[in-house]
Image (cartoon, grey):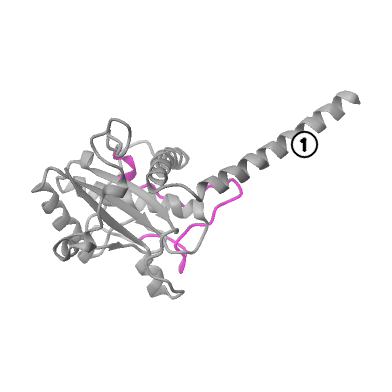
Amino acid sequence: MKRLTYFIMRNVVLKKVVLICVASLSIMSCKRSTDEVWNDTQSAGRHVSRGAKTLGGKHGESREIKSKEEFAGAGSAAGSDFVGLDDEGQGQNIQVKDGDSLPQARETPGELGSAIPGIDAFKDPATDPALAEIFKHLHFDYNSSLVKSDEDLSTIQKAAEFLKARPNMYLFVEGHCDKRGPAAYNLALGANRANSVRNLLAKEGVDPERIFTISYGKDRQFADGDTEEFFRINRRAQFRIWER
């Protein structure tokens, strides 16, 4: 009886310690810098990708769809930018895109000893009218990381040509979602979107070692509203650039 009581009391204490740690981490996460967010999402994206591939039984290479003619439907629940998480926290219909299998760049921006600065040193192309015409925002359907529209595919091609002509220019691709759904799933979806764009740029001939990705999930809304048009605007990938 004493032994049973001991184990019960020990479990209660352990649970309290875990709750305190979780609360502390939550408070700390609100104070993370942009560079820290990138480091977190870089690591998380790799694990999400590996886990989703294993769960889906995918071990080979997939093929990225690059045109509307190649696209043959994408299943998702209407009116939603996310797939609900089950009791184990796994997406019910997560589809791993080709961009997820492309290895990340070997050099980490902002890391000690890196010749490439952190993301805060990369500038928004929108501040330069000429660059803004090239590096336009890309938009996605709900619960999708496919780049499908002719306009977005044209943006990819223009950005690729621009980057290939400037071998000292580096790019961050940000993945964003609308404000609906669980934060954890949207973070993974944003990573898939950014990686999908990175993969398409690499297929256009841009050195993937010059392209980095980050997911902000639903944390950085571009437009504030509750209609489908606002949701569409926020389901996006956008760029930041830096030239050595």
- Residue drawn at 27 percent across, 37 percent down: 105
Instruction: Give coordinates of residue 2: x percent, y percent.
Output: 90, 25
* 101 magenta-colored: yes
Residue segment shown in magenta: 74-102
* Closer to the camera in the image, 198 or 19: 19
Q: Front-most of 221 and 30?
A: 30
Q: Is residue 126 visible in the rendered structure shown here? A: yes
Quarter of the image where the N terminus is located:
top right
Write down the residue under mark 1: 12
Residue farthest to the left, as pictured:
165
The residue sitting at the top extreme is 3
Q: Is residue 64 visible?
A: no
| Magenta span includes 85 | yes
What secondary structure characterizes most of the magenta part? loop
- The foreground one among 12 and 235 is 12
Task: Work out which residue is located at the far right of the displayed protein and give it.
Answer: 1
Q: Secondary structure at mark 1?
A: helix
**Residue at position x 86%, y 23% in the image:** 3
Viewer-nearest residue: 84 or 126: 126
Location of residue 126 (image quadrant): bottom left
